Image (spheres, rainbow, N blue to C red):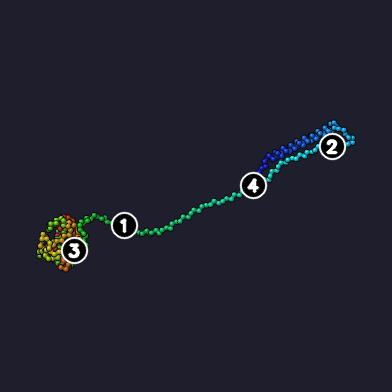
């Protein structure tokens, strides 16, 4: 783009032109005046006849007009081409995705069954659970339980309530005491064979006795008449002891069939 020229050089050019014009007019006027004065004025000295007059030549001044200075050619400013630099887009750093671990396959949970309500069972005191297997029975048995089991307070020895046991007698077919018959007592860690007639006389002449604890207990025991080799001569009688001072003695009598 070309820039506009300043009005100052043009103004100077006009002023110089006017000045030269005025000077030219003044010079002309002066020449005319001088010419008129020389034609009509007195003669300066003797004149030589026949001599040609010397012309007075007015030097002509050639005015040199200072023309306006031509403005230098404006060089167009170079056009600046803007090169747009692309904005660098930051690429997000790729994060490492953890490899999923093997999820265990869920197993079927069995549906809970109805659990029966547990009732509080009295815990036997000072009585180990029976560990002995009940004695086998024999069809050729010759003795059976006489009557039923009788529970009473201990009366046959001086231990009183500080004792628990099983005792009884053996009777023959006629109901008479029969000493010398073997009776086996098991349960609660006990496995002992007794002989009728070895017990306290308070039970009778064919009595037997076996203590099972030093205090009233509620353990389960087994009593059976056996022969000399341990073979069964009666059914197995189960005796459930009662943990009470009034019933710490169980009387079991056998009678020959």
In the rendered structure, which disc, 1 or 2, sits on the residue that comes first in sequence? 2
Residue in the image at 78% along x and 36% along y: 27
Q: How many marks?
A: 4
Q: Which mark is residue 112?
A: 1
Which of labels 2 and 4 is toward the front? 2
Which is in the foreground here, disc 3 or disc 1? Answer: 3
- Mark 4–mark 3 Cα distance, whole angstroms, equals 131 Å
User: Residue 235, how many percent across, how many down?
Assistant: 17, 64
Q: Which mark sits nearer the N-terminus, 2 or 4?
A: 2
Q: Are marks 2 and 4 in contact (CB under 8 Å)?
A: no
Say whether residue 70 is left or right of residue 179. Answer: right
Q: Position of residue 198 (x, y in %)?
A: 12, 63
Q: Quadrant of the C terminus?
A: bottom left
Mark 4 or mark 3, earlier in chain? 4
Q: Which one is in front in this view, the residue at disc 4 or the one at disc 1?
A: 4
Residue at the far front: name it: 45
Q: Which mark is residue 77?
A: 4
Q: Earlier in the sequence, mark 3 or mark 1?
A: 1
Quarter of the rendering containing residue 21: top right
Who is closer to the viewer here, 30 or 127? 30
Q: Which residue is mark 3?
A: 191
Left or right of 28 in this view: 167 = left
Residue 55's tag is 2
Nearest the eye: 205 or 239:
205
Q: CA distance from mark 3 to mark 1?
A: 43 Å
CA gap, disc 1 and disc 2: 158 Å
């Amino acid at each position: 783009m070309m820039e506009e020229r300043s009005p100052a050089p043009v103004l100077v050019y006009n002023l110089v032109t006017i000045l030269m014009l005025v000077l030219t007019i003044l010079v002309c006027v002066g020449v005319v005046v001088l010419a008129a004065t020389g034609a009509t004025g007195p003669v300066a000295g003797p004149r030589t006849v026949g001599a040609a007059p010397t012309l007075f030549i007015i030097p002509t001044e050639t005015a040199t007009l200072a023309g306006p200075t031509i403005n230098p050619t404006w060089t167009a400013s170079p056009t600046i081409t803007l090169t747009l630099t692309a904005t660098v887009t930051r690429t997000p750093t790729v994060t490492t995705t953890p490899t999923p671990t093997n999820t265990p396959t869920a197993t079927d949970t069995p549906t809970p069954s109805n659990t029966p309500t547990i009732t509080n069972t009295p815990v036997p005191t000072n009585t180990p659970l029976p560990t002995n297997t009940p004695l086998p029975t024999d069809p050729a048995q010759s003795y059976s339980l006489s009557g039923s089991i009788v529970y009473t307070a201990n009366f046959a020895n001086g231990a009183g309530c500080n004792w628990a046991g099983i005792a009884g007698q053996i009777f023959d077919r006629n109901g008479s005491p029969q000493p010398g018959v073997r009776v086996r007592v098991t349960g609660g860690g006990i496995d002992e064979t007794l002989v009728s007639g070895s017990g306290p006389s308070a039970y009778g002449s064919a009595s037997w006795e076996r203590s099972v604890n030093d205090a009233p207990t509620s353990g389960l025991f087994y009593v059976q008449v056996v022969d000399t080799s341990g073979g069964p001569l009666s059914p197995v009688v189960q005796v459930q002891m009662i943990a009470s001072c009034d019933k710490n003695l169980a009387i079991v009598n056998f009678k020959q069939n």
